[in-house]
Image: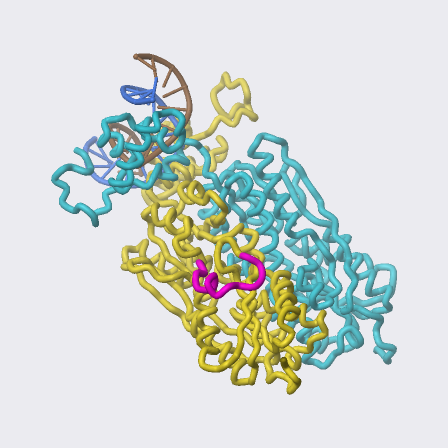
Chain colours: A cyan, B yellow, C brown, D blue
Amino acid sequence: MANASPADVSPSLARVRVTLKDIARQLGVSPATVSNAYNRPDQLSAELRARILHTAQQLGYSGPDPLASNLRRGRARAMGVLYDAPLSYAFADPAASLFLGGVAAALQQEGLNLLLIPGTRDVAPSVASASVDGFIVYCAQDGSELLTSALGRGLPLVMVDQAQVPGIAHVGIDDYGGAHAAAAHLLELGHRSIGVVSLGLSERPQQGPVSLKRERQAGYYTTRERLRGYRDALGRRRARLHVYEALQNTPAEGEAQARALLSAHPEITALLCMSDVLAMGAWRAAQQLGYAVPQRLSLLGYDDLPVAATLGLTSVYQPTEDKGRLAGELLLEQLAGAPERQVRLPTELRVRASTAAPEAQSSG
Amino acid sequence: MANASPADVSPSLARVRVTLKDIARQLGVSPATVSNAYNRPDQLSAELRARILHTAQQLGYSGPDPLASNLRRGRARAMGVLYDAPLSYAFADPAASLFLGGVAAALQQEGLNLLLIPGTRDVAPSVASASVDGFIVYCAQDGSELLTSALGRGLPLVMVDQAQVPGIAHVGIDDYGGAHAAAAHLLELGHRSIGVVSLGLSERPQQGPVSLKRERQAGYYTTRERLRGYRDALGRRRARLHVYEALQNTPAEGEAQARALLSAHPEITALLCMSDVLAMGAWRAAQQLGYAVPQRLSLLGYDDLPVAATLGLTSVYQPTEDKGRLAGELLLEQLAGAPERQVRLPTELRVRASTAAPEAQSSG
DNA sequence: TTGTACGCGTTATCAT
DNA sequence: ATGATAACGCGTACAA
């Protein structure tokens, strides 16, 4: 029997779903015509269309159900971005925000929505149930469940800021080169004892000093490459590097690790921070310890967020927003049938006021 | 080996979609059983389930299609957030990011994904085609198409930072009170000529000086209320307010409007900025003009982002992240059948180093 | 524990 | 310009 019989008991509250068919029945036209009224206005007379829309409004029908329409068309009209942390981190991290902004800009051109999928434990179900036409996997650890479960969907996919995998579209930056340039800059200035405030090495970060072994095994490509860049720059000279790992990419963690580094190794005259966000925290630590920047302590960031220029922070620039836009575009390309591409963007050291030669003090 | 029929012509590229039925047929079991293998593991023997999963893997079946599954269940497993601007703005604005982080945190508890929907021209189709179970409408203009088209979907909905509408869930803050406190603070310090760097008044912002008429007609509730708060605080005293409208909530716009204000009205001794982001730009303008803060110019923000404390910026705190979390929770409540609620969160003036009494100079 | 049968709400195709 | 029909891929009673 009809789901909206004349003897309907609950006229307004019962929310008996009104469907396209109901409209059709009510007007004595075919469901196809009602569908056309919404999707192909040119396929029916303006007059009939008006009547349909009017009846729809009267009956409280708000247009074709996207769930059904998606199924039928085989398109979700959205792209998924997998982020390797709670989403609140993504929004708290300006670099991630910039990146997502770029992605959004690219998708918007095609009218696609953006589905954000956080990488908590148990990502698999989230990924499996995501109504999307493709994925962007951002900053996942090597061999992460995020990536494997996304790949499992068999949809177009773009990896970002990870180790390249043959046959998979990829956008990355020259992490190594940027880090190398940063460390080289410090060496040229004369620094010989340098601290590194590092981003997490793996999904289970360990706060504080990092063993060489752990450093080599870092699960995050970005972190691993930057550390390698720092080390290689120092390699030939007799300078010492002390690496401390932050639990999160936040100013608070930057402050904590900077503090720990400086108290364990007072001879340190410069800090290489693996992000501007960490560097901001390190700066605060320096202030509170009474270390003048750059006289007593040189400070270097990574990312070159807009705020770096404001603060006069020397930093390694990367085109974060472009990276996002590009990731979106590579995804759209695949959706259109083009082959997957791999792109590496350049980085560039931007020297500002936070780095200088170390004071000519008795340093160890 | 072929992944389909023996006579398959295109073995690997043809991407003939593998469905649940194919698995069932291959194993000689019913589709229902395969479905259960994924959704109700307890409904079949572990042995059979293992065989099913194995076959699925072999055939390249990656689990039930979310599009179909969503239709069948009538749930999209995602919530939509409508943002009244290009998404890149949302990510560029720390306050919006914080808010979204809060929303994400709330949704994550229920395993729901977050669909971001930008408010470009032609929102309606985006909203109509969004696979979601509810909407959060953030900062939309009064009577905006965003809101009306979202309401049209007939899904649970929460309005945020807008004028309350009876019968619709709502989260807001005490915009008026915060603004009032900020202006009152300046008056107590002795300021008598004050500039306002305002957020946009409507979807079509007009850079520069704002007429009183336009001020009253501001389409954005938040902007309107804050302006009212500023004005009311000044009302009884004979202080002058000069309101300039920013095109966007960015430091660059803050800088531009601060510059314009100070050059048009050199007698100004304090700036009320309607966001911390604008205030940061205003600060830069002050620096470049050689105006010492707070001696020559007092500076006041709104939102109290973390950076405000770092910079020593006096600001009006609002619990931005909680606001997001709450919005998410109100939405989940409705989905669970509870009645819609309306919540207003408090604001609080936080006085820091950027405000002081005006210098005792001949001021106009 | 497994299978049957049906429908979820829409749209593409073809016919009229 | 409009209609009939057949999928789209799956989940869930209920029967076996």
Q: Residue at x 46, y 35 (%)?
A: A75
Horizontal side of residue A251 vs B327, given as left or right: right
Horizontal side of residue B279 vs A198, given as left or right: left
In the depicted view, which residue is nearer to us: B126 or B45?
B126
Horizontal side of residue A166 vs B178, given as left or right: right
Please provide percent x and percent y for residue B20. 40, 32
The quarter of the rendered structure image containing the N terminus of chain A is top left
* Span shown in magenta: B206-219
Q: Given the current orientation, which residue lies at the most extreme front position?
A: B364
Total marks drawn? 0
Splitting the image into 4 quarters, where does residue B334 fall? bottom left
Report if residue B215 lies within the magenta region: yes
Residue A158 visible to the viewer: yes
Q: Is residue A243 above or below residue B117?
A: below
Q: Residue at x 20, y 48 (%)?
A: A12
Report if residue B70 lies within the magenta region: no
